[in-house]
Image (cartoon, grey):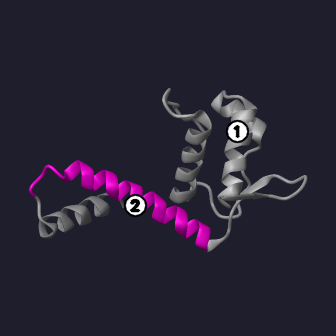
Amino acid sequence: MSVSFNKRDPIYLQVIQHLKRLIVSGKLRPGEEMPSRRQLANDFKINPNTVQRAYSEMEEQRLIYTEPNRPSHITEDPAVLNQLKNEWLNKAMATFVSAIEPLDISLDELVPLLEEKLQKRK
């Protein structure tokens, strides 16, 4: 795993966003074991306390769970996973709508373009 961190946002939040992206995309699957905190810190070349903070935040959001003396795992709770997917989709839609706002394009023109782009990625 590699990620480029920006200088304006706290690193632990960027780690959370990166892991959320992996969950939403299916690269990290429900029930899958998370990398250890030390391993992820080493992979990202960041302080293990930063990873610990990210994991703690993700546990509060119920995105991961940790049993005593066991590795952390991705949640299998469909409601939490659906909420994450909807959160990700809403952010993407807000960005998209903001980006096309200056264009004079109707929904009837937009839908076929979206369908075409979605077909090409498959």
Q: Is residue 110 left or right of residue 91?
A: left
- Label number found at residue 51: 1
Residue 49, x across and y down, in percent: 75, 34
- Label number found at residue 40: none
Q: Is residue 8 left or right of residue 78?
A: left
Foreground pick, 2 / 60: 60
Q: Which residue is mark 2?
A: 90
- Quadrant of image for the C terminus: bottom left
Tell me the crowding category of disc 2: few under 14, some 14 to 19, or many 20 or more residues within 10 angstroms, Cα based: few
Tag 1, which secondary structure? helix
Give how far apart the Cα atoms at labels 1 and 2 are. Answer: 26 Å
Q: Label 1 sits on what residue type?
A: Val
Instruction: List the single residue furthest toward the right.
Output: 69
**Vertical placement of 9 versus 106: above or below?**
above
The span shown in magenta is 79-104
Residue 28, x across and y down, in percent: 62, 55
**Vertical placement of 54 versus 111: above or below?**
above
Secondary structure mostly taken by the magenta-highlighted segment of the chain:
helix
Foreground pick, 114 / 62: 62
Which residue: 68% across, 64% down?
75
Residue 98, x across and y down, in percent: 26, 51
Which of the 4 image quadrants contains residue 26? bottom right
Determine whether label 1 and label 2 are within 8 Å by CB. Answer: no
